[in-house]
Amino acid sequence: MVGNGLQGTLLGVRGEIEGFSTFQMSFVMSGYFVGFLGGSRLAPSLIRRVGHVRVFAALASLISAVMILYPVLTHPVAWCIGRVIIGFCFSGVYVTAESWLNNAADNENRGKALSAYMIVMMVGIVSAQGLLLVGDPSGYEQFVIASILISISFTPTLLSTSPTPAFETTHPMPLWDLFHISPLGCVGMFLLGGVFANMFGMSSVYASRVGLELVEISTFIATFYIGALVLQYPLGWISDRMDRRMLIMTVSAVGEAGALVGTLFGSHYLILIGAAFLIGGMANPLYSLLIAYTNDYLDHDDMAAASGGLIFINGLGAIAGPLITGWLMRDAVAGPAGFFLLIALLLIILVVYGAYRMTQRASIPVEDTGLMAPVMATGTAVAVEFAQEIAIEADLEAQEADNQEGHNAV
């Protein structure tokens, strides 16, 4: 995650140095999500054919090689191809790690294992921003550092004596069936894909365009993820105690307000940091909220299939997000402020659509909803299934406790 976080930020800074246009960089950044979506579909078959260890080592070595090639092939087309490859490979790496972790965990430590995994991912991305200050982004040293970090990540897996588990995945639910079950979940995940793609891909492009110093760029990008880390669990706790649709609309409105503040007052650095904290702190819990809201209308047996469909929809939004942002950030349109403008627009649409859906279907009583399982938007369907297993187990335990309490009362 340190290597991945570094390369994403570094490309945005280096693209500005190389004189790439914002629109060219939007295609470069979108390439990651094209590859990620493809990898999430193909990685499971690779794992079934050759096993977890070989897939992890092969994909990580390919990532390491592409990192080295970035400063050698400084052309938007070459970078776009590289980002597609890296997105594909990271998707496979995540699937490998998440499935292995889920298999190794049991009912006693599954929740702790997922929490530790999420914290490691966030800390890795945040830590990566500090490495932006090591070396000159116009040279090759930082690309080498990212490549070395990825190469080192092979070691624990290749030397592990743990047996590799059998691998199985659930086929995604047909998208039309999923939309019929939860229109808000589907629309929300598509819109949120654009928000995440901006945060993960275009934030460094924006920061470079407005002339921030390296230390300011690294702090700005890290703040998105710090907000997510700080607010994920408090909002998850609230989610289990109130109408989820109202919370989805409220969280979206707060994130929208942060984006509008960034649009209007982006020239003030401290305000910019506050906007990043609000957007990151609201967007990541929204991902888990939308999945939990959709699950409220599903049987336990259908949740895994639905999560695959939701993540696919989210991936489509992520591909489109940077491309629209690149167009908005052109000087002839909105300039750099287009970065925040798109985030605000997407979240406004989510608020309005959420209000519309409240007129179409009554809310499920809070006591009849399942628990929300926090999950990172950078994870794959395997991580979401992992989280859902934890939520389902907790829900069943709570039902059993209630039944036992009722039996004792009788």
Image: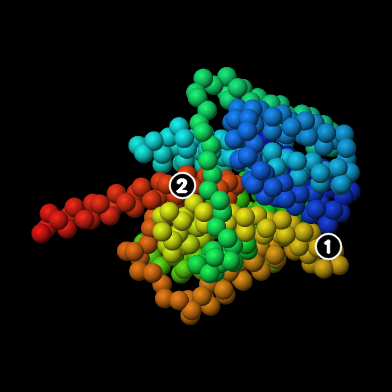
Q: Is any part of residue 107 visible from this angle?
A: yes
> Which numbered tag is attached to residue 126?
none
Name the quadrant of the N terminus.
top right
Disc 2, SS: helix
Q: Tell me the crowding category of disc 2: few under 14, some 14 to 19, or many 20 or more residues within 10 angstroms, Cα based.
A: many
**Please, what is the three-letter code of the amino acid marked with disc 1?**
Arg
Q: Residue at x 54, y 65 (%)?
A: 177
- Judge left or right: residue 121 versus residue 149: left
Q: Residue at x 66, y 69 (%)?
A: 345
Extreme residue toward the bottom, this view: 359
Q: Nearer the viewer, residue 50 or 190?
A: 50
**Residue 196 placed where, x, y %?**
64, 55
Corner quadrant of residue 97: top right
Disc 1, SS: loop
Name the quadrant of the C terminus.
bottom left
> Which numbered tag is attached to residue 330?
1
Q: Which residue is mark 2?
A: 387
Q: How many marks?
A: 2
Q: Is residue 348 above or below residue 128?
A: below
Q: Nearer the viewer, residue 407 or 30?
A: 407
